[in-house]
């Protein structure tokens, strides 16, 4: 382990780390080979918060776990002051660099910098380490077996639940109520019947429950791996009482960085973003109820010889801080067994006995619980002695585990998977039950309870096959009962529940001026005991209540929009909250609130241009149609006609299976005025792969706001689509302006219509990637000109802020709203905003071009 010097700073524990070589081997080599090229790098500061030391010194000063968490997160955010010092130093020295992302959970800034700037940083004492952002790629802990299983188990429970004694905790009344899970996986199908109403994104703003990498809105990959894991943690089909999961009354959040294709693989830096989000989903460190209680991780990679800092570096700091913040992080050990020393990174790290907490797999269907042959073994390659050398920590059922999936035909069903990523959710599910029973137990204590009470298997004592043994939910409960008095489960059954709306989420509508909310209550309630607050997030809010009558067990209420509200084209999030003021005690208040996101086509004037400069295609001015909820349009950085920029891409080459699925980009609804000519144009890039892969591109027009679509005005198959004769590239990416062609479609037949919409649609032949850019709709011969510019991620800092000036990482236009929807400020092309006159509280900043909403906290 590296030697550290402990110093007192910011009234907390701060560590200064001194390093010899500050550049990773890869960064050193690339700078030698490309001495003039800018590099995208992580800059790690030499000072950091020591989470364990901070906990030891300050935890006893706080009333409960949540109050301590607030203090710890606040201290982590304060630590960014050191980052500001060296960043300002770079600016003052006039070095060329750009901030990509500034982190607070660990002392790291991601920048793009010139070699001169990097060499300057190398000589600063404030800098400990630099590596390329692309280093440390992470991989999917792929199951060794996946078989669809259409059988159900009415009123039954899976054997793995019994093996870990989860059903014994049920008998005590625990079901995970009030606890929250985060699945760090391939994503999730949130509408699976086994947990549909447990997705937190239906009950809080979506950005507080979903952190999308590959899918802007919640979804899973074709393998449904994340959906399967989520089901084991907390699944139960209410229609059949088919219990596939442990904490069936818990809620869950999700993120989707895990991929199958090596071409889409993420780096540890990408992963860091979601962990930082997990520690502060709502953007306000003074709140903790938004945080997950448990994170289930199904990612990692085999330890390589080039992992010189894998055992001791910023990734270790991250997992320590996650644990100290109160989150129980559970990690699959890997499926690289049966050889020794095969635990994957970062599960291999051993900063403490239970951090990082890695889980091996046994066959839970056999009473002797034999180890699965594929389960990765210890010892850790990070070295040490005794318990710190042994891996995994414990084992759980990971063979022939039945849980939730969506099959190739789009049906929600079940499948049997084998893998350590089937074992870890059993541990996560038990952890959710324990969190319900012991809300003030620390994450460390919960993991220690699981570790020290595990049932010994294999060799006597802890070993590198079974770790400390098989998880025992009741044993862990007894262990924690020696530290805390268990929180008694609620005996209440009364519940008011907003269960759905009369419109579909993530769908498009011509206009919306009222929404019906459906209620699924446990009993009849008087209307005078209920009031509703509803509105559109960041725009407006209203109240509704009725003084007479009752709301039945299954009822609904129609909520009208204010007459002065006009919705332009774009995405909107509607919410309703039911406030009950009667004498009964509700068992669950989270489900009193319901959110839904939908698209309004609106009315827009011509001329029109979309150049896809947003980070996500869903942030563009076009609606994305994805009927099968699988691969769909995205944005990609490409070489265009002017410079490197974003374009829209349909990854037909990786769209599997090939069933000629259709995905489309749809313009807003345009009001047409008389002109002599009407033209639709777009830039196209496509490489023909093989003649047998019949990709196609079609353009449709609608004159009734998308209710019906006319005969195609443009249709081309792969031969006519090709724009290049360059050597075959299986996952085509445009390389220069010669790879593009501008397509012109005459729509003059529609020039006398009062309104039109245009849809640009692909048909999947699983051929090659297809790109479109600079979509124009214009009168006569006057297209909108475009100069493509690279726009980095929008960063708002400092946030939270004290009254003063808040800065933006690039000039933006937008509006600032109070949390109640009142507009308090409007600004145009500003890179900073003076908020000194505003009262303390939470505000919503809506960016004009993308419609994206950011939270701004003013203290």
Image: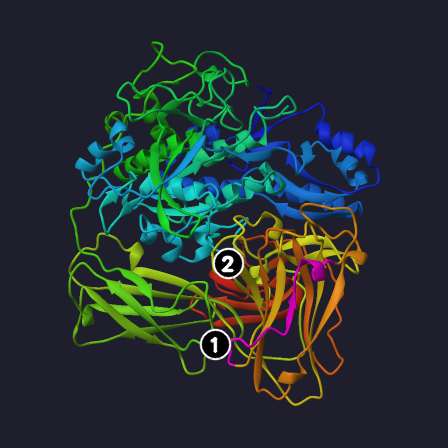
Of pointers 1 and 2, the one earlier in the residue sequence: 1
Reading the image, the residue beneath label 2 is 855
Q: Choose between 733 and 27: the one closer to the eye.
A: 733
Residue 716 is covered by the magenta coloring:
yes
Q: Which residues are magenta?
A: 704-722
Above/below status of 120 relative to 214: above
Residue 476 image position (x, y, % from top left): 28, 27
Task: Work out whether residue 288 can be spotted.
Answer: no
Q: Choose between 62 and 181: the one closer to the eye.
A: 181
Check disc 2 and report its element: helix, strand or loop: strand
Q: Quadrant of residue 577?
A: bottom left
Residue 699 is tagged as none
Residue 756 image position (x, y, % from top left): 58, 80
* The residue positioned farthest toward the top in the image shown: 460
Instruction: Say which quadrant the N terminus sits in.
Output: top right
* The residue positioned farthest toward the front in the image shown: 692
Left or right: where 541 falls relative to 817: left
Left or right: where 703 falls relative to 188: right
Q: Residues within 10 Å of mark 1 (few under 14, many from 20)?
A: few
Q: Choose between 372 and 318: the one closer to the eye.
A: 372
Residue 678 is covered by the magenta coloring:
no
**Residue drawn at (47%, 31%), measured in percent from left and top?**
54
Reading the image, the residue beneath label 1 is 707
* CB contact under 8 Å: marks 1 and 2: no
């Amino acid at each position: 382990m590296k030697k550290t010097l402990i110093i007192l700073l910011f009234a907390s524990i701060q560590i200064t780390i001194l390093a010899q070589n500050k550049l990773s081997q890869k960064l050193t080599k690339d700078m030698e080979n490309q001495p003039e090229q800018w590099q995208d790098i992580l800059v790690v500061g030499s000072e950091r918060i020591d989470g364990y030391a901070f906990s030891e010194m300050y935890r006893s000063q706080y009333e409960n776990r949540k109050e301590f968490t607030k203090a710890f997160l606040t201290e982590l955010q304060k630590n960014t002051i050191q980052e500001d010092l060296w960043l300002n130093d770079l600016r003052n020295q006039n070095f060329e660099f750009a901030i990509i992302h500034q982190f607070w959970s660990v002392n790291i800034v991601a920048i793009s910098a010139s070699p001169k700037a990097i060499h300057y940083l190398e000589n600063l004492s404030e800098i400990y380490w630099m590596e390329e952002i692309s280093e440390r790629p992470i991989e999917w802990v792929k199951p060794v077996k996946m078989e669809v299983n259409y059988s159900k188990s009415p009123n039954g429970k899976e054997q793995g639940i019994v093996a870990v004694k989860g059903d014994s905790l049920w008998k005590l009344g625990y079901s995970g109520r009030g606890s929250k899970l985060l699945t760090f996986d391939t994503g999730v199908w949130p509408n699976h019947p086994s947990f549909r109403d447990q997705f937190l994104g239906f009950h809080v703003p979506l950005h507080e429950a979903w952190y999308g990498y590959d899918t802007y809105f919640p979804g899973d990959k074709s393998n449904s791996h994340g959906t399967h894991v989520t089901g084991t943690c907390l699944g139960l089909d209410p229609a059949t009482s088919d219990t596939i999961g442990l904490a069936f009354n818990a809620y869950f959040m999700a993120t989707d960085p895990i991929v199958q294709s090596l071409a889409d693989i993420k780096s540890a830096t990408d992963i860091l973003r979601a962990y930082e989000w997990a520690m502060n989903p709502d953007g306000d460190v003074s709140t903790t109820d938004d945080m997950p209680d448990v994170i289930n991780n199904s990612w990692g990679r085999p330890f390589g010889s080039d992992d010189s800092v894998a055992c001791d570096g910023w990734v270790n700091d991250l997992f320590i801080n996650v644990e100290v913040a109160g989150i129980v992080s559970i990690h699959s050990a890997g499926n690289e067994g049966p050889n020794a020393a095969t635990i994957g990174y970062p599960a291999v790290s051993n900063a403490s006995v239970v951090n990082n907490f890695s889980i091996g797999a046994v066959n839970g269907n056999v009473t002797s619980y034999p180890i699965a042959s594929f389960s990765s073994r210890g010892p850790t390659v990070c070295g040490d002695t005794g318990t710190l050398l042994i891996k995994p920590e414990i084992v759980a059922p990971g063979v022939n585990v039945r849980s939730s999936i969506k099959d190739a035909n789009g049906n929600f069903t079940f499948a049997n998977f084998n893998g350590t990523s089937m074992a870890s959710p059993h541990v996560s599910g038990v952890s959710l039950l324990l969190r319900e029973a012991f809300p003030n137990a620390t994450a460390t204590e919960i993991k220690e309870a699981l570790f020290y009470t595990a049932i010994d298997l294999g060799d006597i004592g802890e070993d590198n096959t079974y770790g400390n043994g098989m998880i025992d939910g009741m044993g862990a409960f007894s262990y924690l009962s020696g530290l805390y008095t268990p929180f008694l489960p609620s005996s209440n059954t009364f519940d008011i529940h907003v269960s759905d709306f009369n419109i579909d989420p993530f769908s498009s509508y011509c206009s919306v001026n009222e929404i019906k909310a459906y209620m699924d209550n446990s009993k009849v309630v008087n209307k005078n005991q209920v009031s509703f607050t509803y509105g559109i997030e960041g725009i407006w809010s209203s109240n509704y209540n009725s003084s007479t009558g009752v709301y039945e067990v299954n009822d609904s209420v129609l909520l009208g929009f204010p007459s002065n509200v006009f919705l332009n084209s774009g995405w909107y999030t509607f919410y309703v909250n039911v406030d009950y003021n009667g004498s009964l005690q509700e068992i669950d208040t989270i489900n009193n609130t319901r959110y839904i996101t939908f698209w309004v086509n609106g009315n827009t004037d011509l001329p029109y241009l979309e150049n896809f400069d947003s980070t996500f295609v869903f942030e563009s001015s076009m609606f994305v149609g994805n009927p099968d909820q699988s691969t769909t349009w995205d944005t990609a950085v490409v070489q265009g006609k002017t410079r490197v920029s974003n374009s829209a891409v349909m990854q037909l080459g990786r769209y599997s299976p090939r069933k000629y699925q259709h995905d489309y980009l749809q313009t807003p609804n345009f009001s047409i005025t008389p002109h002599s000519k009407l033209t639709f144009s777009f830039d196209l890039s496509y490489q023909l792969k093989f003649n047998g892969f019949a990709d196609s591109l079609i353009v449709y027009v609608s004159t009734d706001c998308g209710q019906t679509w006319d005969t195609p005005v443009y249709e081309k198959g792969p031969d006519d689509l090709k724009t290049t004769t360059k050597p075959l590239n299986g996952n085509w990416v445009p390389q220069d302006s010669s790879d593009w062609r501008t397509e012109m479609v005459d729509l003059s037949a529609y020039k006398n219509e009062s309104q039109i919409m245009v849809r640009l649609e692909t048909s999947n032949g699983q051929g090659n990637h297809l790109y479109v850019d600079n979509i124009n709709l214009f009168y006569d011969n006057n297209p909108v000109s475009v100069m493509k510019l690279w726009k980095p991620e929008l960063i708002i800092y400092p946030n939270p802020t004290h009254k003063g000036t808040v800065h933006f990482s690039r000039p933006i236009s937008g509006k600032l709203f109070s949390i109640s929807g009142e507009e308090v400020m409007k600004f145009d092309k500003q890179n900073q905003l003076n908020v000194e006159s505003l009262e303390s509280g939470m505000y919503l900043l809506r960016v004009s071009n993308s419609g994206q909403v950011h939270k701004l906290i003013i203290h």
